[in-house]
Amino acid sequence: MALPVRFDTTGPYEVEQTDTPFARPDGIELLARVYRPLGEPERPLGAVVYVHGGAWARLDRTADPILCGALAASGAVVIALDFRQAPDHRYPAAGADVAAGVRYARAHAPRLGADPARIGILGSSSGGLLSLLHALKPAAPEHAGTPIVGPDGALEAGPRDASVAFAVALYPVADPLARYRYALSREDEPPPPSGFDANRLIASHRAFFADEAAMAATSVTRIVSAGEATALPPVWVGQPDQDDNVPAAITEAFVRAYRGAGGQVEHAHFPDARHGFMQQASPDTDKGVALIRDFVGRRLAGG
């Protein structure tokens, strides 16, 4: 007999996965992978919308299965999104798709057994930027327009609350222009054993953003510092100290800006880890899963 489901950081629940269309911008069907704990909820569950990394040009909703599965095993509904990527689509298309993902989660909360008032967002690397950008500006006009698949199967393009209760960001590209200039400074270096590829990152930035002004405009560090954020939900940020893809200084600048603006942010360090470490099983991944489960559990409980 299945256990009654409530959020439990030990992750005792079995998980089911299903892929389903969640949005259809310009006739392009976007899929979401929904992770759900098996069992009858004691009350509507918290939900987390997941936004994958991949330099805005690769990977998809199937990324980070360890973390997504662990959160679902703890008693959350996780909705992992596909979104439009470079080189075929430039920003703000991806931002509009992420906003649609949150609207989809809220519209389908009754069917998913989720609480529409307890929806958070989670992103890694380039998806960390998109997640934080949405968390800080959930009603940004540039992120409107992607129609979601409504509960009745019809497309729904009208306004719906897209705010989030919290945000989790793993090694986020919090300042795209700073990361772009960092990659330019290493353009002529041979790729190191870590796999860092400056040329690939430079190409991804140029394909996703129209120009450097667009990179600067989407910097969540700049947005917070300039007082442009319309929301400051609690944030958890994880940063590997050996990250040569997103230097720790970029994350630290965001943390300082967020705290300076009055936001609550928890900043976890992983001294021996590298960029993308949560994709593989390891002691650092176990630590990250435990810390994120704890943060999400407290946020869902209102703590």
Image: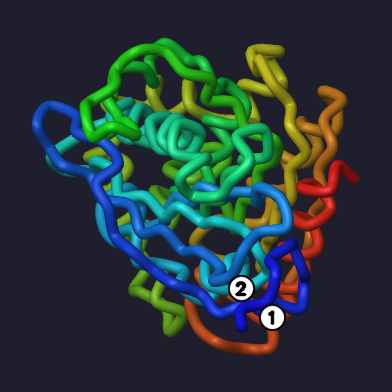
Q: Is residue 116 left or right of residue 177?
A: right
Q: Amino acid at mark 1?
A: Pro
* Of 204 and 228, the residue lying toward us: 228
* Of 42 and 90, the residue lying toward us: 42
Label 2: element kind: helix
Label 1 crowding class (10 Å Cα cut-off): few <14, some 14-19, many 20+? some
Label 1: element kind: loop
Can residue 215 be seen here? The reply is yes
Vertical relation: 279 (above or below) 212: below
Vertical relation: 91 (above or below) 145: below
Estimate the spatial distance between the alpha carbons at disc 2 and disc 1, rounded to whole Å. Answer: 6 Å
- In the picture, residue 151 is in which quadrant? top left
Residue 113 screen position, x and y as percent: 55, 49
Residue with the most extreme left position: 27
Q: Is residue 181 left or right of residue 207?
A: right
Of the image marks 2 and 1, the number of the one nearer the N terminus: 1
Residue 198 screen position, x and y as percent: 36, 59
Q: Residue at x 84, y 37 (%)?
A: 264
Vertical relation: 80 (above or below) 176: below
Q: Residue at x 54, y 31 (%)?
A: 133
Which label was assigned to residue 198?
A: none
Looking at the image, do the residues carrying marks 2 and 1 touch, with CB atoms under 8 Å apart? yes
Residue with the most extreme bottom position: 282
Residue 137 screen position, x and y as percent: 57, 21
Can residue 202 be seen here? The reply is no
Q: Is residue 114 left or right of residue 185?
A: right
Which label was assigned to residue 73?
A: 2
Q: Amino acid at mark 2?
A: Ala
Which label was assigned to residue 12?
A: 1
Residue with the most extreme front position: 1
Label 2 crowding class (10 Å Cα cut-off): few <14, some 14-19, many 20+? many
Q: Residue at x 84, y 48 (%)?
A: 301
